[in-house]
């Protein structure tokens, strides 16, 4: 708050005060009053008034500067009402009361939408669990009636199952802290579970898989990390070269401060200018446009989000027409940060 702006707000009262002083001086001229009195009275009135204005300015400036400093330091600006102290002037108290009312109204509004979102999330999770039953039943029927048609249907059911699982993990991704269990896991167990989930398409596509150096332990949630690895393997299958057999190399690395799981393929790769964007929500890029509707741009976005929640670093490197490498880096004792 600048003094010049503050004085502008007081111009009306200053003009009224000057008018009052002039009126007093006119009345004093009627009476035989000494010159000293005629000079002393307006000077004292003006001096007292301006001392009062200066005191008010200093008090308000100090408070509003304090308010502004708190706002600058806060990351969550909506917490301002619980941080500021009650000022000792009327305008400040009125402002604080208004902010508290706004804060209360905002919290009530947020809670309403939070309840609606929770309700919707519960419905989505319930629906996903329910849809798994007819999928499993359909697969059992196919198992007992194997032919070219049922094999093709089974592939589509695998796709449906993958997308429903993706939807389930997406729905839970914002509340992972309520649904994780950190324990020691063997990398070989994680990889084998992920391969098992994709065994049908891996066999059909005659994918060559090279596993080695996976006898390492990491601290993580097994269910969530299997989903992440599963998404990466599915991406490798989706973006394979049509004229070449897909080769997957999955192995572990042991560092001083971390353990890593590396998944490499010889697929179509990613353009250099697109590598930094692959973790963005909905980004499909050039390869995604080639695949059309088969690419949603959700898989790697979700992997990155879940890795961030689990304290895992995900690094992707790729060369166009050469292949892609995804590295999952598990810090030792990363579960402490959760």
Image: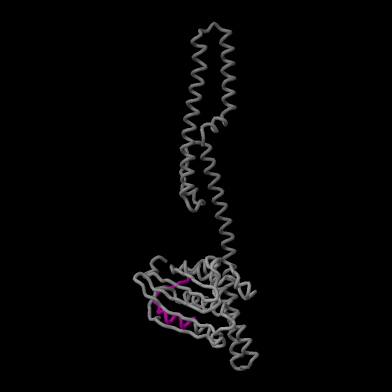
| Image coordinates for residue 78, horizontal then vertical, percent | 52, 51
| Image coordinates for residue 14, horizontal then vertical, percent | 56, 25
| Colour scheme of the rendered structure | one colour
Q: Nearer the viewer, residue 100 or 68?
A: 68
Q: Residue at x 38, y 67 (%)?
A: 336
Quarter placement of the C terminus: bottom left
Which of the 4 quarters of the picture holds residue 94? top right
Residue 99 visible from this viewpoint: yes
Q: Is residue 334 left or right of residue 150?
A: left
Which of the 4 quarters of the picture holds residue 140? bottom right
Q: Which residues are magenta?
A: 179-194
Residue 133 visible from this viewpoint: no
Task: Find out whether residue 182 is within the magenta segment.
Answer: yes
Q: Nearer the viewer, residue 196 or 183?
A: 196
| Image coordinates for residue 53, horizontal then vertical, percent | 50, 28
Instruction: Pick out the residue farthest to the top.
Output: 32
Task: Find out whether residue 180 is within the magenta segment.
Answer: yes
Which of the 4 quarters of the picture holds residue 238? bottom right
């Amino acid at each position: 708050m600048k003094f010049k702006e503050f004085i502008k707000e007081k111009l009306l009262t200053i003009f009224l005060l000057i008018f009052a002083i002039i009126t007093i001086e006119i009345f004093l001229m009627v009476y035989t009053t000494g010159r000293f009195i005629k000079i002393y009275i307006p000077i004292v009135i003006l001096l007292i008034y301006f001392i009062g204005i200066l005191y008010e300015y200093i008090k308000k400036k100090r408070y509003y500067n304090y308010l502004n400093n708190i706002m600058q330091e806060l990351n969550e600006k909506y917490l301002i009402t619980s941080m500021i102290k009650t000022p000792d002037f009327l305008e400040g108290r009125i402002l604080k009361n208004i902010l508290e009312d706004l804060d209360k109204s905002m919290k009530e509004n947020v809670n309403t939408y939070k309840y609606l979102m929770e309700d919707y999330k519960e419905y989505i999770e319930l629906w996903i669990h329910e849809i798994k039953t007819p999928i499993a039943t359909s697969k059992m029927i196919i198992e007992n009636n194997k032919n070219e048609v049922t094999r093709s249907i089974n592939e589509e059911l695998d796709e449906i199952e993958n997308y429903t699982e993706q939807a389930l993990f997406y729905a839970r991704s914002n509340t992972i802290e309520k649904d994780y269990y950190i324990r020691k896991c063997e990398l070989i167990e994680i990889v084998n579970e992920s391969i098992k989930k994709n065994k049908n398409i891996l066999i059909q596509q005659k994918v060559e898989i090279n596993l080695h150096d996976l006898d390492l332990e990491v601290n993580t949630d097994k269910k969530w990390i299997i989903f992440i690895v599963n998404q990466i393997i599915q991406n490798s299958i989706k973006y394979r070269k049509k004229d070449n057999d897909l080769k997957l190399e999955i192995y572990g690395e042991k560092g001083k401060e971390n353990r890593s799981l590396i998944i490499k393929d010889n697929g179509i790769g990613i353009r250099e200018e697109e590598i930094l964007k692959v973790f963005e929500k909905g980004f499909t890029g050039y390869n995604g446009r080639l695949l059309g509707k088969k690419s949603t741009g959700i898989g790697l976005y979700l992997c990155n989000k879940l890795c961030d929640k689990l304290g895992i670093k995900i690094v992707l490197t790729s060369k166009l027409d050469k292949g892609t490498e995804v590295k999952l880096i598990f810090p030792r004792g990363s579960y402490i940060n959760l």
